[in-house]
């Protein structure tokens, strides 16, 4: 694997390439992106795709990619332009792409703005409120976990975040009226380290779930879009957003093994089923 730095006016983007460019077998490079996760989250998948040229990157302001624009917020449209710049730098034609969580939202913005960048997009559990019937209630729950983070620190915020994202079905008044969860009950720290810049728990990344996809542009794109959902996520927030987005695009969500982090190994304490996930991803990509 080789590390590269793409120096742009607003950011120095660091990306990694495993395998030759142009690709040895003529297949598109396989790019894997996440948000707020950086390239390290795809380690297990990169290893399992050693027969393909795989590209991963750190989004601006995360991991090794350094912002020079003075910004702190994370907008899908801006990050889409970063990914577009990397794809242009690869000079290998359109890529296949596995995009997960906020990375899937970035990928939808990318396909909208640059429809010829991606041959097949597997959009895995994009957190997009607007496709849900209870979008307003979901946002109220987001305000609540953000407030818990701002008032009491990371442990309190993460406990409230986990409570929301593990709630099954629509967010109801019953859920919104529950007392704030105890961080200790979720194995989270109860002390406050004073930081308030977590991209997941602060308002810095609200633009991700509040992104409204251009459904008509996505339908008209030459990109083959496959909305993916983990089998363990079907009833919870990111599962519901995946199913609803797929329906809005005129398809059924494709069920993948495991959960929201199903592609990951155990190195981050959130082990999925990386081998089974990779097998399903190969199956989906080979249908193109």
Image: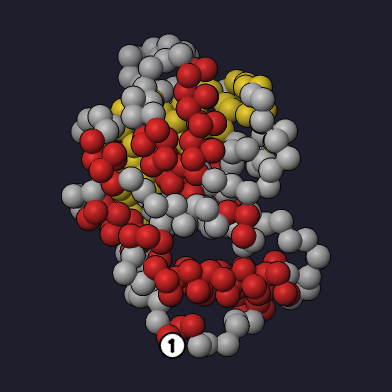
What is the secondary structure assignment of the residue under circle 1? helix
Residue at 58 percent of width and 87 percent of height: 179
Q: Residues within 10 Å of mark 1 (few under 14, many from 20)?
A: few
Q: 193 or 3, which is in the foreground?
A: 193
Farthest residue in the right direction?
194
Residue at 68 percent of width and 47 percent of height: 72
Q: 16 or 169, which is in the foreground?
A: 169
Residue 152 in the image, given as x and y percentages of width and height: 73, 75
Q: Can residue 274 be seen by looking at this rendering?
A: no
Residue 48 in the image, given as x and y percentages of width and height: 44, 35
Q: Quadrant of residue 189?
A: bottom right
Instruction: Look at the image and tell me in which quarter the N terminus lies.
Output: top right
User: In the displayed structure, would residue 217 be above or below residue 130?
Assistant: above
Instruction: Look at the image and tell me in which quarter the C terminus lies.
Output: top left
Q: Quadrant of residue 199?
A: bottom right
Residue 187 in the image, given as x and y percentages of width and height: 64, 73
The residue indicated by pointer 1 is 174
Residue 212 in the image, given as x and y percentages of width and height: 39, 52
Q: Quadrant of residue 107?
A: top left
For residue 205, side relative to residue 116 (left or right)? right
User: In the displayed structure, would residue 114 be above or below residue 212?
Assistant: above
Residue at 52 percent of width and 24 percent of height: 85
């Amino acid at each position: 694997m080789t590390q590269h730095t793409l120096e742009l006016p607003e950011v120095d983007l660091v990306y990694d390439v495993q395998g030759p460019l142009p690709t040895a077998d003529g297949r598109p490079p396989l790019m894997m992106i996440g948000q707020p996760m950086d390239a390290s989250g795809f380690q297990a998948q990169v290893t399992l795709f050693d027969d393909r040229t795989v590209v991963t990157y750190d989004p601006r302001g995360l991991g090794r990619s350094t912002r020079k624009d003075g910004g702190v917020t994370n907008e899908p449209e801006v990050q889409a332009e970063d990914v577009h710049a990397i794809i242009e730098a690869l000079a290998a034609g359109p890529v296949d792409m596995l995009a997960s969580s906020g990375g899937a939202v970035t990928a939808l913005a990318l396909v909208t703005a640059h429809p010829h960048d991606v041959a097949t997009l597997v959009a895995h559990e994009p957190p997009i409120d607007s496709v849900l019937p209870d979008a307003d209630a979901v946002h109220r729950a987001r305000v609540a976990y953000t407030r818990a983070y701002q008032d009491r620190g990371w442990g309190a915020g993460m406990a409230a975040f986990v409570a929301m994202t593990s709630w099954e079905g629509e967010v109801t008044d019953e859920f919104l009226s529950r007392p704030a969860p105890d961080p200790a009950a979720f194995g989270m720290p109860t002390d406050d380290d004073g930081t308030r810049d977590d991209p997941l728990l602060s308002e810095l990344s609200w633009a991700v779930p509040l992104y409204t996809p251009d459904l008509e542009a996505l339908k008209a794109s030459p990109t083959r879009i496959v909305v993916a959902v983990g089998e363990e996520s079907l009833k919870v927030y990111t599962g519901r957003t995946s199913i609803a987005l797929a329906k809005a695009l005129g398809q059924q969500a494709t069920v993948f093994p495991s959960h929201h982090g199903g592609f990951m190994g155990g190195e981050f304490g959130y082990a999925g089923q990386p081998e089974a996930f990779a097998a399903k991803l190969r199956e989906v990509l080979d249908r193109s």
